[in-house]
Amino acid sequence: MLDSLTFGFLGGGNMASALIGGLVARGVPAGSIRVVDPSEDARQRLSQSGVKALAAPDAAFGASNVIVLAVKPQQFRDAIAPLVPLLTDNLIISVAAGIRLQDVARWMGRTRLVRAMPNTPALAGMGMTGLAAAPGLSGADRDIATAVAEAVGQCVWVENDDQIDAVTAISGSGPAYVFYFVEAMERAAVEMGLSAEQGRKLAVETFRGAAALAAESPEPVATLRERVTSKGGTTYAAVTAMDASGMKDAFVKAMHAAAARGREMGAEFGKD
C-alpha cells in the first residue's frame, strides 16, 4: 500500500527521521519522500538517505499523497503558512504535540486529518503511537495512517483529542517514566555495592524482559506481579515499601498531571 504513495514531511527532526527510515524499510522508495527543513545541516543529513530535502515547500511537496506535520508546536502555525496554498487533496498527519485536530482543520482548511502521538522508542523501531481521526475520515485513510505508524512500531486508535491527551500521558511521556525508574535502580545498585554499569544492565534488561512477558501473556499484569511476590519474600518487602510510600498513587497522579498539561497546551496553541 505505502510503496505506491508519495510523502512530504514538514520538519526533519528525530521523529520524522524515524518515520522516514521505517517507511523506506517498508518498501517506500526514498525518492518518493520529500522533506522540508530550514536547517542546511538537517537537509544534508536527510539527503544522504536518498530523500529529497528542501528548504521550503514547493508544488511537488504540496501534491504529496500524505503530508506529515512534524514540527514543534510553538512553530506550527508559522511552518504551515507557506504550505497551505500548495495543498491538494492530501491526507495530513500531524505529530505536533498539543495541536488539536479542530485547530489544524481550521488553520489548513482541510478535513482529511489524523492526529498522531508517537513516542521516542520509534527511533528503535519499537514505538507506540496513538491516533485520532477528524470526523468523516475514510477507512482507506485510516489504513494509510495505521501503516505509517506501524512502520516504527505499533499503534492504537482513540476517539478524540481528549483521549490523545491520555495517550500522551501514558505512552508519549512514558519512556521518561521508564528511564526515571532505571535511574533509581542504578542508584540502588551502586548503594548496594554494584557498579553503575552493572546496575544499568540489570535494570534495562529487567524492564525489557518484563515488558516482553506482559506483552505475550494474556493474564492481567496484577497476576504476573503476584506470581513473583511471595508473601514474606524479597519482592514482597519491596512492593510493601513502595505501597507504604504511596508510590502507585503518586505515579497515577503524575500521569493525570501530564494529561492536564496536554489539555492546557491545546488551549494555548489553539488561540488565534
Image (cartoon, grey):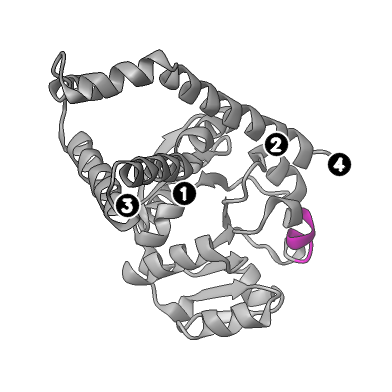
How far apart are the alpha carbons under marks 2 and 1?
18 Å
Comparing marks 2 and 1, which lies closer to the viewer?
1
Determine the residue positioned at 36% across, 60% down.
Answer: 124
> Residue 212 colored magenta?
no
Which residue position holds label 2? Answer: 266
Mark before the other along the chain sequence, 4 or 1: 1
Mark before the other along the chain sequence, 3 or 1: 1
Frontmost residue, 64 versus 266: 266
> Residue 79 colored magenta?
yes
Q: Quadrant of residue 86?
A: bottom right
Which residue position holds label 4? Answer: 272
Q: Are marks 2 and 1 in contact (CB under 8 Å)?
A: no
Name the amino acid type tagged 3.
Answer: Arg
Badge 3: how crowded within 10 Å, few (<14), some, or many (20+)?
some
* Numbered mark located on residue 119 in the image: 1
The answer to whether residue 262 of the structure is visible from this angle is yes
